[in-house]
Image (tube, rainbow, N blue to C red):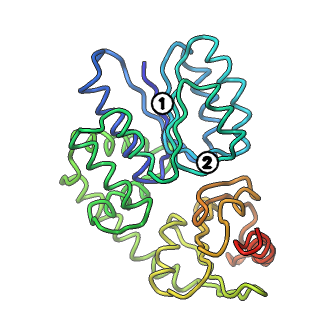
Amino acid sequence: MIISITHELDLDGLGSQAIVKRYFDYFNEDKTQEMKLYYAHYTNFRDLVKKIFNKFPLQNQFIISDIGFNEDFRELFILFSRAKDKDCKIFWYDHHLIDNYNKEELEKLLELYLNDPKRCSAEIVKDYYLPDDYVANKIAKFSRDIDFQTKKYEIASNLQSIIAYNRGYELDDVKKKIVDLMSIGKFEDPWFDEELVKVKQLESNQTEFALNHIKMIDVKDFGEILISFAKLGGGKIVSILKEHFTEIKCYIGIDFRYNEIIIHSDYVNCRELARNYRGGGHKNRAGFKCDKLFTTNHEISQDFIQSMKICINKFRIDRI
């Protein structure tokens, strides 16, 4: 059995899984192997892996993609070691920054750990499994467009919106359908059109909400930062803020549904800031989760704002 665990919130995660599925469906010699698809993000990956390891025999093959490493994940090392002793093969493809000591341990524990910040995860998976396949290359191209924010392809943007809309384990069957369609090279489909209508309506309403709930905060010795929230992914909120306010040095988007935060800045080491909250990501874009973000009046709490002021100055690029 092939068990695939990927990042549920973006095209790079589902795109990576679609390439893996395409390989095992069409190109692997043993086409009899069953494939199980799972979806995670940095706040629930550790618990999901434990659950899967308890459910399935360790003789299976595990493929992890687009899950950035958090320090909490070290708790899984004992499971990885036990799996290795049972000749269980675990492959992990990623592009998020990782400390050398964790990377070296993963390379020892796993069958393969590939991490390259210069490529998105779908590109890494494509290059490993299907480097010359037309569909895999297209998936990787669209995934890179979203992860590196090159904004060249409307199809990629639409797919990303649909994926973000269908977050949560109760919508895993929808994500599997997205993966199935991409794995056979269908990036435009009537079903995608139907989903996009729902997505655009939500985005329109919540964009207005986010723009109406902006807090502009002056951080001493740094400059202005923008914070807003809505029932949208934090990354989408950041994109909205950047589109309307181009000269700000730091943007923070809060997904009001899950208290999940995305920070984007070229002047702050966002990954190190996020790690301060047990999150992670990239140097200029990272995510974390924080409790008690809002007051009873649904306003961003002053405790969080003060915490951000301190952290932004602490992790300024010109200071570290």
Q: Residue at x 51, y 72 (%)?
A: 237
Nearer the camera: disc 1 or disc 2: 1
Q: How many marks?
A: 2
* Residue annotated with mark 1: 63
Front residue of 66 and 37: 66
Verify CB contact (< 8 Å) between mark 1 and mark 2.
no
Q: Is residue 272 left or right of residue 8?
A: right
Residue displayed at 68% across by 20% down:
81
- Residue placed at 27% from the left, 46% from the top? 137
**Which image quarter holds the C terminus?**
bottom right
* Marks 1 and 2, how far apart at CA: 16 Å
Element type at mark 2:
loop
Q: Which residue is mark 2?
A: 42
| Nearest to the observer: residue 135 or residue 170 | 135
User: Residue 143's spot in the image, x, y percent?
Assistant: 37, 54
* Disc 1, SS: strand
Amino acid type assigned to the residue bearing label 1 in the image: Ile
Residue 96 in percent (x, y) is at: 56, 50
Amino acid type at image mark 2? Tyr
In terms of depth relative to the viewer, which is nearer, 153 or 45? Answer: 153
Using the rendered image of the protein, determine whether residue 95 is visible from the camera's viewpoint.
yes
**Relative to 170, is 222 above or below?**
below
